[in-house]
Image: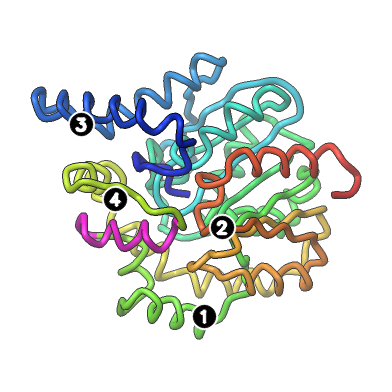
Amino acid sequence: MYGFFILRNWPNDMISNKLKLIIVCICFSFLSGCSLVRWKIDNDESSLKSVGFTQLDISLAEGGTLSYWRGGQGQPLLLIHGFGGSAVTTWKDEMLALSADYDVIAPDLAWFGDSFSAGEANLTTETNAIIQLIDALELNNINIAGISYGGFVTFNILNNANQHNRINKAIIIASPGPYFSDDDLTALTERFAVDNPEDFFIPKNSDELRRLFEGIFVAPKMMPDFIADQIYQTYFAAWHKQKVAMIQSLSADRDTLLTAPIATTPTLLIWGEQDRIFPVEHGIYLSKKIQAPLVVIPNTGHGVTNEQPEMVVRLIKTFIESEKL
């Protein structure tokens, strides 16, 4: 869910050329004062625009703006990112590949990327914003994929009596839905040596950002200080109060979700074998609870869409196009 500028999963024969490019960009960054993270954002957005994606937005009823990217043709496929980053940092590679077969719509959740809401910072507001987007675009027969916090949003949509009939199939990635306990949150804080979950998920400086990334990704990362500072300023410095409220309200949101009947929408679960945020045991339990197939990807952490984009694309396409996985 955090697809930022770090060295990860490049083939060996590409490393030298990539390193040369990075060195040139670093030198340019130092000499010009330009942000290397801003360069990465511009490069990613240009690649999306080159295959027909457009960034659009809608006004939210409660006040605010929901930004989204749309490209491709075919059956609607809604991609919902997790806590941190944006639609592009989480889903860029999947967007490029899946737009060949689907009408891909990837929104920035409120208080992330280019979106914000005047509503209360919680799961209900996030879900309602996505429903407003679905209504504005008059979407039906939708396939929806959500990772981590985006999985909570997906569950909430599936449990909405007025919305679940509009959903064809759902893909939940690294998200336990409402099936996590307060003890699970306590275990998370102990794993990462923090007092509260928000202390882990919402870094306040570059050192805490590195701790977050170490918890999310399996592969070693290279993150010089100036890049860490730029990532923090770009993705975490703004809307701090709202992001804290979202994490702090998660237990109450869970309790609300638990009161709803289990949705019958065909669902696929995807998990990283080495997920340290929501360990794979959560996926196994969820699979049994909602009677959904579970695919566990080896050597993968919580950042599944960034670490294994080609596998995610194959799984999403196979699940959507097949009666059975």
**Residues in magenta, as a range:** 204-217
Q: CA distance from mark 1 to mark 3?
A: 38 Å
Question: Mark 4 sits on what residue?
Answer: 236
Q: Position of residue 173 (x, y in %)?
A: 62, 55
Instruction: Report the side of 211 relative to 26 (left or right).
Output: right
Looking at the rendered structure, which numbered label has been put on residue 299? 2
**Residue 210 sits inside the magenta stretch:** yes
- Amino acid carrying mark 1 in the image: Asp
- Amino acid carrying mark 2 in the image: Asn
- Amino acid carrying mark 3 in the image: Ser
Q: Residue at x 76, y 51 (%)?
A: 164
Q: Residue at x 65, y 36 (%)?
A: 135
Q: Which circle's residue, 2 or 4, is located before the other in the chain?
A: 4
- Amino acid carrying mark 4 in the image: Phe
| Camera-side mark, 4 or 3 | 3
Q: Which circle's residue, 2 or 1, is located before the other in the chain?
A: 1
| Camera-side mark, 2 or 1 | 2
Q: Which circle's residue, 4 or 3, is located before the other in the chain?
A: 3
Would you say the magenta stretch is mainly helix, strand or loop? helix
Q: Residue pushed farthest left?
A: 31
Question: Mark 3 sits on what residue?
Answer: 35
Instruction: Report the side of 296 relative to 127 (left or right).
Output: right
- Regarding mark 4 in the picture, which secondary structure is present there? loop
Q: Which circle's residue, 4 or 1, is located before the other in the chain?
A: 1
Pointer 2 with pointer 3, Cβ within 8 A:
no
Q: Within 10 Å of the Cα at label 3, are there few (<14), some (14-19), or many (20+) other Cα atoms?
A: some
| Camera-side mark, 2 or 3 | 2
Q: Residue at x 47, y 78 (%)?
A: 185
Q: Within 10 Å of the Cα at label 2, are there few (<14), some (14-19), or many (20+) other Cα atoms?
A: some
